[in-house]
Amino acid sequence: MTRVRGERIDDALAQVRADPMQGLAAKVAFLRRPESYPEPARRVDPVEAHMSWVFLLDDYAYKLKKPFRRNGIDYSTAQLRNLNCRRELRLNRRLAPDAYLDVVALTIDARGQFALGGSGRRVDSLVRMRRMPATLTLESRLRSGIVVVSDARRIAAHLAPFFADATRARMTPAAYRRRLLDAIAAAEAKLAHPGSGLQPGRIEGLAARLRQFIDARGELVEARARSGRIVEGHGDLRPEHIYLTRPPTVMDCIEFDRRLRLRDPVEELAFLAMECDRGGCPQFDRWLFAAYGELAADNPPRALIGFYKAYSAFSRARIAIWHLDDPDTGPGQHWIDRADDYLAHAARYLDKVARADDACEPG
């Protein structure tokens, strides 16, 4: 097993425990080196995300979670990171069984040297995945302007049986309604905060319109829970997580909070359609829901789809603003602009819902 020289184990472990971010820097330095891996690697391309580092090799990818603790997410200890790595592996194998391979220990030996899968003491864990071609993502096809109806049909054909077989949530109609209202309130509080760089009045107006829909059309929402439609799904169905392999591969589900995976499949698909709208393919919505309706015998009113798209855009604006709390995620103005774009989409969806005939107007 390839190792890189470090400090004595007692000193190294003390450093990691005293300053998790400094310990993270040492781990990242080790994982940047091609010789650190059991697989042959000509180079390593490290990619930093909000809560993790991903190290891209020729044919594999290794994901290291940061010692992150914020917004209900807790990766603060090696034990918690290991738990979440194993949960990530198990959950993602549902939609990407060939891509998620195993969890690998990052160890340190008596000489203070790191190793992957070594015999020393475990100091962290990494998810090992098969590297997927970036050109196969739905996001890449959106950027190239080459998304076609068969792409939407293939995705629907992959997701429909997944949702049909998924664990059903024990959630009453009233509880589901309250959950949506609570999420709207939480997003409103974050987005309207003076530090967000957004106009509070605009945020409050959009939140009021979302609540108004639930007040006026709450039966559409409650009917989904009443008919047992709320399932343990993916939770983060973005175009960059969908690879148009045969069959499609869907990666990066939310593993850290089961509540965020408990969703109406139509909400999950509306979220994906919203992101495809932003990616320049508004017709994807029509293609996706037509295929899903045929395969799942589930044809919700367009008003509900439009609401879910607005709700998803409002929620994503909140997540964009969260990045302002982390200086490692780039210039703050980027995230403010991103939140602003999501809010503009939310407003447009609500405008369409307000004037549309449920049976025929696209959301």
Image (cartoon, rainbow, N blue to C red):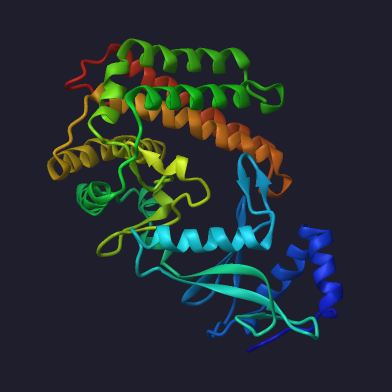
Quadrant occupied by the C terminus? top left
Is 284 left or right of 233, judged from the image as shown? left
335 on left or right of 25? left
* Position above or below: 335 against 91: above
Q: Give residue 118's quadrant in the image.
A: bottom right
Q: Which corner quadrant holds the N terminus?
A: bottom right
* Residue 47 on image: x %, y %: 60, 61
- Residue 324 appears in the rendering: yes
Q: Residue placed at 73% from the left, 63% from the top?
A: 24
Q: Residue at x 64, y 54 (%)?
A: 75
What residue is shown at x 41% (from left), y 57% (from top)?
Answer: 91
Q: Residue 197: x, y in percent?
A: 67, 25
On the question of residue 281 being in view, the answer is no
| Residue 79 quadrant | bottom right
**339 to 41, vertically: above or below:** above
Residue 280 position in % (x across, y down): 37, 39
Nearest to the observer: residue 337 or residue 259: 259
Reply above or below: 40 against 264: below
Q: Is residue 332 above or below residue 330?
A: above
Q: Is 242 situated left or right of 157 in this image?
A: right
**In percent of the image, x 48 and y 59: which residue is there?**
88
